[in-house]
Each structure stands twice: as C-alpha cells, then as structure tokens.
Amino acid sequence: MRSRPIAEAWSRLEASERFQHNITELGGRPEFLFPEVALERSLVLVKPDGVQRGLMGEIMARLERRGLRLVAARFQKVDRPLAERHYAVHKGKPFYAGLLDYITSAPILAMVWEGPNAISAIRQTMGATRPDEAAPGSIRHDFGLEVGRNVTHASDGPETAREEIGLWFRPDELVQWERSVDRWLFES
Ligand code: IDP
Ligand code: MG
C-alpha cells in the first residue's frame, strides 16, 4: 500500500508526457521503468559537413563530457525518402530542396543520447540554428558559419524526439545500459 503523498506523486508521474514517452521507448518493461523516468532521449545527427570536416569525434566528446549517455549510433548514407520523412515539417519552405540535397550529399552519423533534460541540454550544446546567432562555446558557433551548413541536428521536443528516434532506429538498436559514473551525473 503506497502512502498518500507517494500515490499522488505517482499519479502525476503516470500522467506526464515524459513518463509516457519513456514507457513507449522502453517497450513498457517495468524493471527498466523506474531508473529511466527522469531521463529524456534525443536524436542527434552529425550532418554531412560535420562528417566531412572530421568533427564526429569532437561532437561525441562534447556530448559525453556534458554527461549524456549514448543509446544508439549508426554511420550511414541517407536516402531521399528518409530525408523527406525526417524534414517533412519543412516541406514547402524555400530552403527545403537545398536541405534535402545537403542531408543526402554524404554519410551522416545518427545517434540517440539520453540524460536528464537531454532535449534542451543537447539543443543548448548544439547552439541556435543559425551559427551566426549561436552562443559562443556551442558547436554551431564554434564550427559553423552558415545556416545551411550547421553541422548537427537535434530533436526539438519530447514528441519530435519520439518520432525521430522511431524513424531512425529500431527498438532493438536502442541500448539500455548503466555507467558507474551515472550516480555522479544523474541526481536520481
Ligand atoms: P534546427 O536544426 O535548429 O532544429 P530547423 O528550423 O528545424 O532548425 O531547420 C532544420 C534545418 O534546416 C537547419 O538545421 C538547417 O540545416 C536548415 N535551415 C533552416 N533554415 C534555413 C535557411 O534559412 N536556409 C538554409 N537552411 C536552413
Ligand atoms: Mg528542427
């Protein structure tokens, strides 16, 4: 029997978007549910310019140093249908055709990273969409000049992250693991 405050907190938790997101991501396996409730996941792409310029290691290193945990990674070419699905939200915009050419022009590194508030933390590490507006110290600032060559992609919200992770990775490619350092990075 759960005490009342715990039962109430549990109800709020079950109703939250993040909890539902994590249940879906983990296939609803209760044994993995509890340690994961506070974690978010984001798709991250090192785009063709980042790969060609030898920035894959640098970008992974920055995410690792931030404390984020790698869940999945694949080095691959991007075909047109995948590019169109990934960027469907931008269809009709003036830069759409150029964006598809860019993302399909050379291999990319597709990854999933997780951690507390991972979506906003990763967007912050990447910096603003336009490198000339990105904060100094962010990847897009430190390695970019033009919006059409901005090195990385990261999911912009929990719902987008869920859709994008499902688009790029099969559930069995998402690796559930723990690091001994996690307790020094994740408060709970
Ligand atoms: P995001 O990558 O920061 O989420 P979005 O607005 O979702 O930015 O745009 C997706 C991608 O489309 C950008 O990362 C960039 O590569 C490209 N893009 C956005 N706006 C422009 C533009 O005005 N010109 C050229 N490319 C653009
Ligand atoms: Mg976006």
Image: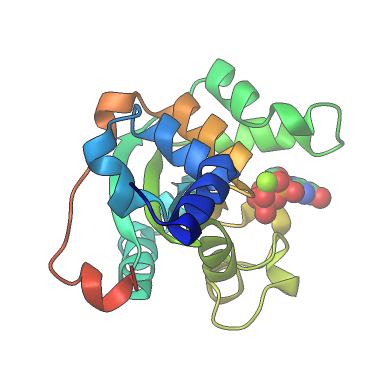
Q: Give the x, y percent position of residue 21.
A: 50, 38
Location of residue 144 (image quadrant): bottom right
Identity of the residue drawn at 62% across and 68% down: 127
Q: Give the x, y percent position of residue 139.
A: 52, 69
Residue toward you, 10 or 73: 10
Q: Give the x, y percent position of residue 128.
A: 69, 65
Q: Is residue 93 left or right of residue 11?
A: right
- 14 in relation to 166, above or below: below
**What's the image's color scheme?**
rainbow
Give the position of the C terminus as an image quadrant. bottom left
Identity of the residue drawn at 38% across and 45% down: 112
The number of numbered badges drawn on the structure is: 0
Q: Is residue 28 left or right of residue 153?
A: left
Location of residue 135 (image quadrant): bottom right
Task: Note whether residue 46 is visible.
Answer: no
Q: Residue furthest top?
A: 81
Q: Give the x, y percent position of residue 1.
A: 33, 46
- 110 in relation to 86, above or below: below
Residue toward you, 119 or 33: 33
Task: Note whether residue 182 is visible.
Answer: yes
Q: Residue furthest left?
A: 180
Identity of the residue drawn at 33% across and 70% down: 186
Identity of the residue drawn at 70% across and 59% down: 129
Q: Residue furthest bottom?
A: 136
Q: Is residue 69 left or right of residue 130?
A: left
